[in-house]
Amino acid sequence: MYPTPSVLIDCAAACDYRCSKAGLHKRCLKYCNICCGKCQCVPPGTAGNREVCACYNEMKNSRGGHKCP
């Protein structure tokens, strides 16, 4: 389990930016918000940079791919 940050982030705003260029915007927002809620972290930028948030990076879908956009 990862330590809980002392400050909660605004997942809606962070995910809105993260998914702003996604082709499947609603799907991106859904999974980003799920991941952010669990990890309290969203990587910077609109893609990549997952290594910044270990929890976000390590969450996998049922096929073994990245769950978080």
Image: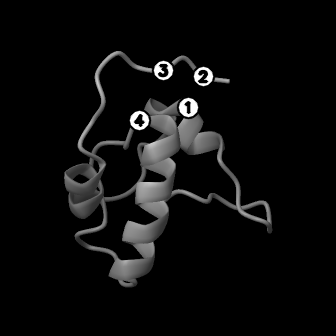
Mark identifier at residue 4: 3
Q: Assess whether mark 4 and mark 3 are in contact (beta carbons under 8 angstroms).
A: yes
Residue type indicated by callout 2? Tyr
Q: Assess whether mark 2 and mark 1 are in contact (beta carbons under 8 angstroms).
A: yes
Residue type indicated by callout 4? Gln
Q: Which residue is mark 1?
A: 54
Image spot of residue 10 (x, y percent): 23, 43
Q: Residue furthest bottom?
A: 23
Q: Is disc 4 surrounded by few (<14), some (14 to 19) or many (20+) residues within 10 Å?
A: many
Image spot of residue 13 (x, y percent): 19, 53
Q: Which residue is mark 2?
A: 2
> Which of the two labelled residues, at mark 3 and mark 1, occupies the earlier sequence position?
3
Q: Which residue is mark 4?
A: 40
Q: Which of label 4 and label 1 is nearer to you?
A: 4
Mark identifier at residue 46: none
> Which of the two labelled residues, at mark 1 and mark 2, occupies the earlier sequence position?
2
Image spot of residue 24 (x, y percent): 40, 84
Image quadrant where one finds the N terminus: top right
Q: Assess whether mark 2 and mark 3 are in contact (beta carbons under 8 angstroms).
A: yes
Q: Is disc 2 surrounded by few (<14), some (14 to 19) or many (20+) residues within 10 Å?
A: few
**Which residue shows up at 30% across the image and 48% down it?**
11
Alpha carbon distance from label 3 to label 1: 12 Å
> Which of the two labelled residues, at mark 3 and mark 4, occupies the earlier sequence position?
3
Q: For numbered disc 3, what is the local secondary structure? A: loop
Where is 4 relative to 49, above or below?
Answer: above
